[in-house]
Structures are given as structure tokens and as C-alpha cells.
Image (cartoon, grey):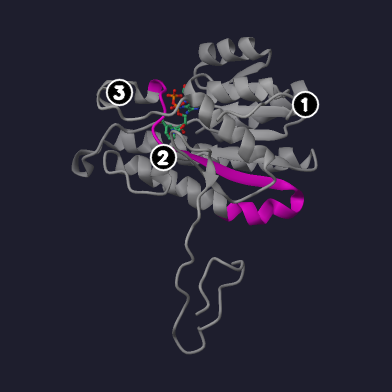
Amino acid sequence: MLHDAAGRLAGRVALVTGAGSGIGAATARHLARAGASVCAVDLDQEAADRIAAEVGGLAVRADVGEPAEVTAAFATCEERFGGVDVVHLNAGVVTGHGEMDTLPDDVYRRIMRVNVDGVVFGMRAAIPALNRRGGGAVVATASLAGIIPFAPDPIYALTKHAVVGFIRSVAPLVEAAGITVNAVNPGIVDTPMTAAIREPLVADDFPLLAAEEIADAVLDAATSGRTGECWVCQPGRDPEPYEFHDVPGPRTAGGVGRRPPGLDDGELSLD
Ligand SMILES: NC(=O)c1ccc[n+]([C@@H]2O[C@H](COP(=O)([O-])OP(=O)(O)OC[C@H]3O[C@@H](n4cnc5c(N)ncnc54)[C@H](O)[C@@H]3O)[C@@H](O)[C@H]2O)c1
């Protein structure tokens, strides 16, 4: 069920990457409905312009894999709107390549720079910007393929597992500053990214998510006050934080009951 967005981000500013299409476009619209001023960032200038015009926001052309362009996008947003409160690190691509022995170098490099570098550079720019506002929220679009194996595109799964580990690891570092850091982890969403596989899925009655459902999850995650969580989105269910299991702790002499510095309760079993 989609939640009412009205007023939930009144007076706030949101920056969305990959805002020109699919999930990013739906999020830009949803955050605008929630009252936020929206900065729509995309590699595709025309697409960014279109969404920004629709939501009365600001379009910025930037490649999330280029650190200087990411820094400039945040600076432009802060200059225009006076700050940033919610950041959706969403831009992403797939390889479309399942066979590892024939994976082209350029395809591998491209996905790593968008899906991994893009989230790292975005986080690096977001933290000081959110600190200047006294706190805020970062939500990254990972994927179910960041939690479970995804054999049709193992490199895509690699990048999304990286995002999950990164989000969960950064969250405790910025919690005291009032910054929450979460991921959304959708199943298959009906967007241009999945257009090529849509027809057989629909013919097989496989349920697809609508981009608006992920936008709803992004707003929920950003306003939940919770942090370090991965919000699984599946058709017919409300988004919910995934329950990660504890991993076994050391059993060697001197190791039982100890966890490495920096790990909180509940991440390593002490048995
Ligand atoms: N569609 C799905 O089934 C699905 C499922 C789970 C997760 N996701 C993730 O959701 C995110 C959005 O996917 P979507 O389905 O909306 O895809 P999409 O292809 O519809 O939109 C992606 C947008 O990102 C932009 N983009 C690509 N490279 C960029 C770069 N280097 N810098 C800036 N912008 C760039 C594109 O121009 C496009 O506007 C991605 O991270 C994707 O991995 C998608």
C-alpha cells in the first residue's frame, strides 16, 4: 500500500541521482509531493530537465562515477536551495552479461564506476552537506541482488552486495551526527532497465513492482529514524528491513566472547 506523502518533507531539500528515469524519477516526484525541493541529477541532461520541470525542481547533469561532477552537483543544490536534507543515491546500470569467461573489460569497468564508485562519491559528498544541516538521511538503491545471489548478472550482484556492506558499515559512523543511512532492496521493478525482460515475465504472470512503490519505500526509509537497514521491497508486501543473521564468533582460546573493536551487539554471536 502506498503511503500518503503530503507534508512529510515540507521545507526540506532532496537530491536524487539517476532521477531521469524509472525509480529515480518516481522518487523525485514522490519527494516533491512530500514537500521537498528536488535536485534531479542524471547523466542524461534532457531526462533530468524533464523531471525537474515536472516537479518544479533543479536539474543537474552529472556522471556519478566522476568525483568532481558529484561534488559540483551537491554544491549547485546547496547554492540553489540552501542545503540538502535527503539524498537518494540511486543511479545504476546492469551488465546484461551472465558469462564470466567472456565479460568485456569495458562493461565491468562501467558498472563498477556507476554502481559502486557512484555510491561512494555520493556518500562522501552527502555527509558534509548533511552535517551542515545538523543531520539528514541517505538512502541508496541496492537490490535484492545485494542480499541473494543473482546468476543472470553476477557482477551486478557484486556491486549491490558492495552497496549493502557499505551502507551498513557507514551507518554507525554518522549516527551521532543525526544522519541515517539505509538501502532499499527491490525485486524486479517495471522500469526501462528491465524493459528487455518485461514481456516474458508478464507472459509468465511474474509480479513486477512499480517504480512508485520503491519511491514510497525511499521516503519511508528516509523518515523512519532507523539506520543501517536494508528495506526489502517485494510485490504485494509493505517494505520491511531485512533481518541479517548473527555470524559465529571465534571459538579459539582467548577468542570466545570477544568481538573486534567497532562491532556492536548482535553482529557476532558470543557463544
Ligand atoms: N529495475 C529494477 O528491476 C531494479 C531492481 C532493483 C534495483 N534497481 C536499481 O534501481 C536503480 C535505478 O534503476 P531503474 O530501474 O530506475 O533504471 P533506469 O535505467 O530506468 O534509470 C537509471 C537512471 O540512471 C541514470 N544513470 C546511469 N548512469 C549514470 C551515471 N553514471 N551518472 C548519473 N546518472 C546515471 C540513467 O541516465 C537513468 O536515468 C539502479 O541502481 C538499479 O540497479 C533496479
Task: Look at discs 3 and 1 and give the one toward the viewer.
Answer: 3
In the shown orientation, is residue 162 left or right of residue 199?
Answer: right
Q: Is residue 181 magenta?
A: yes
Image region (quadrant) for ligand 1:
top left
Q: Amino acid at mark 2?
A: Met
Indicate which label's residue lies in the foreground, 1 or 2. Answer: 1
The image position of residue 236, as x and y in percent, is 45, 34
- Disc 3 or 1, which lies upstream in sequence? 1
Residue 211 visible in this rendered orientation of the protein: yes
Name the kind of residue labelled 3 in the image. Val
Mark number for residue 201? Answer: none
Horizontal and vertical percent for residue 39?
Answer: 65, 22
Q: Amino acid at mark 1?
A: Ala
In this view, the residue in front, 95 or 140, is: 140
Q: Which residue is mark 1?
A: 10
Q: Is residue 47 left or right of residue 130?
A: left
SS at mark 1 in the image? loop
Q: Which residue is mark 2?
A: 112
Q: Position of residue 189 (x, y in %)?
A: 42, 29
| C-alpha span from label 2 to label 3 | 30 Å
Q: Which residue is mark 3?
A: 202
Kindly state the secondary structure of the residue where label 2 is placed. Answer: helix
- The span from disc 1 to disc 2 (Cα, nearest Å) is 35 Å
- From which residue to which does the magenta span run? 169-192
How many circles with numbers are drawn on the protein?
3
Q: Is residue 129 magenta?
A: no
Q: Secondary structure at mark 3?
A: helix
**Gap in angstroms between the C-alphas marked 3 and 1:** 38 Å
Sort mark 1 into few (<14), some (14-19) or many (20+) by Cα contacts within 10 Å: some
Label 3 neighbourhood size at 10 Å, few (<14), some (14-19), many (20+)? few
Q: Which residue is at a point 59% across and 34% down the rendered structure image?
A: 218
